Image: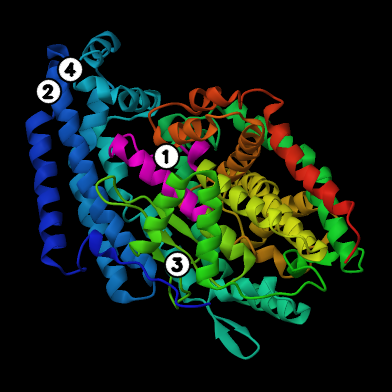
Amino acid sequence: MGSLPEWNLHDLYPGMDSAEFLEDLAGAEAECRSFAEAFRGRLDDLARAGGAELGPVVERYEAIEDRLGRLMSYAGLVYSGDTTDPNRAKFYGDTQERLTAASSDLLFFTLELNRIDDAVLETAMAQPPLARFRPWIEDVRRDRPYQLEDRIEQLFHEKSVTGRGAWNRLFDETLASLRFRVRGEELALEPTLNKLQDADGAMRREAAEALSTVFRANLRVFALTTNTLAKDKEISDRWRGFEDVGDSRHLANRVERETVEALVEAVQDAYPRLSHRYYKLKARWFGRDSLDYWDRNAPLPRVDQRTIGWGEARDTVLSAYSDFSPEMAAIARRFFDGNWIDAPVRPGKAPGAFAHPTVPSAHPYVLLNYQGKPRDVMTLAHELGHGVHQVLAAPNGALMAPTPLTLAETASVFGEMLTFRRLLAGTTNPTQRRAMLAAKVEDMINTVVRQVAFYAFERKVHLERRKGELTPDQICDLWMSVQAESLGPAIRLGQGYEVFWTYIPHFIHSPFYVYAYAFGDCLVNSLYGVYQRAESGFVERYFALLAAGGTKPYGELLAPFGLDAKDPGFWQIGLSMIEDLITELEGMEEP
């Protein structure tokens, strides 16, 4: 695979015990205390004095948030490099505790902002420099109906370290420590999951059985973690007054519950036309009526498998980005040139992949577990899309750079689509073209169908948890119910698959995050259709969408493309693209 890059975190801090880190940490703690002493109880008076008085206070608050974010980002990235290292774990835990304590001094700020009279704040926001922060302030005020008395908010905040944060860390460290025996070799999670894409069916089965055996052996820990966090969320939701189990996530995403329900309903109605239909076709390619669950992501028979070197993966993605926009490729190239990517699989390293935005005063970092498969190339394209988005949004500052999840997956999925279309256009061999189309359909099913099924599973777990603690077998039964419905009769969900919910990190770290993937994929399918038909100006509009960060709602950002996610027909546009690819596959000669 060539030499795989490891990230250089020195752009944040030279080391865990460096003087720079320790001084910044102590300085952040002091600044939080100083800020509280200077402004607690004064925001209403400052707002009545006008935007020229309150604006500098918000600017100072933003600078503190950037500093805190830099410290916590560094600790988190160091920890993700090896979650089984006790020294890194302690460093991460100690940093989290100190920053949580320090930031409790800042809790008053948004709570007091939300108690200012609407008319007073409106007048102040019309004046500089406060006017620049209008999008952020309006965003904060959406949380007003759900905020609690100051002391309760402080208690929730400080206990997060020993509550949700501790259970998150237990999950991460448990998962990283697991080893799976395959062909006499002890493997970590990522290499074992990778075996499910092996060309050897016996290898896929052995890997699946190894995963099942180890997950089953640790089932009580995963079940207790899930039960505890679901109850923790129920307590928080009840105190804050959220009606539905997903409402807090929808609020954080700045999306209406009705829009999410329309997406979920559209995808579930499409199960027979998408996943059921495709897996029936795939089973036929394998000469069977149905496939075992470990064959779901198997490569097509009689298609040569090769390892894709890192250099080829890099050039493929950068070329695809450059065809769309040289500027986008130039931003992505900085991740390679600056050692902003950590690609190798290592014992203890966090599984999966992510792009961490860190803070606007620094730059993002990308984590991969690259193993040379075609899907790894698409993952690189995906995470670099996030990275480009984060770079473009950074000038909005620490308060307005973050993008709600409704648009957070746009650049990532669009980057994947650009890469796929470029590869497909350069493929003339019918067998290879079929394999590429099949891989793309499987990725789209994993992104849309599978994630909506994940969302349905989470809803069932959280709703049932309100009636009492769930046994491990009850959680497994809920998992199997949604998986059977979504994958269809052509996938045999045999014994062992019932515990495969245990390793999904989104259920633990970000409840109900998963629908954002389906939202993003369907949105990008529609957006790509506009791009294919668009006259000049699409690239500029697309860059404006990404550069907006969190300054505008998703509806306003989609309007220049003629798209409206509230339109019931909107989701069908994206789903029809997946159907069209399946139809094309059905029309090809069998391998």
The label shown at residue 51 is 4
Quadrant housing residue 43: top left
Residue at image mark 2: 42
Q: Distance between the residues labelled 4 and 1?
A: 34 Å
Q: Between residue 186 and residue 12, name the one nearer to us.
A: 12
- Label 4 crowd (10 A; few <14 / some 14-19 / many >=20): many
Residue 565, percent from left and from top: 61, 27
- Label 1 crowd (10 A; few <14 / some 14-19 / many >=20): some
Residue 27, percent from left and from top: 10, 51
Which callout, 2 or 3, points to the residue nearer the camera? 3
Q: Do the residues labelled 4 and 1 touch (CB within 8 Å)?
A: no
- Tell me the element at label 2: loop
Name the residue at 88% across, 65% down. 285
- Label 3 crowd (10 A; few <14 / some 14-19 / many >=20): many
Q: Between residue 324 and residue 371, name the one nearer to us.
A: 324
The first of marks 4 and 2 along the sequence is 2
Residue at image mark 1: 236
The first of marks 4 and 3 along the sequence is 4
Q: Magenta segment range?
A: 382-408
Q: Does the magenta stretch include residue 383?
A: yes
Residue at image mark 3: 350
Which callout, 1 or 3, points to the residue nearer the camera? 3
Q: Are marks 1 and 3 in contact (CB under 8 Å)?
A: no
Name the residue at 48% across, 65% down. 368
Amino acid under disc 4: Gly
The first of marks 4 and 1 along the sequence is 4
Residue 488, percent from left and from top: 82, 53
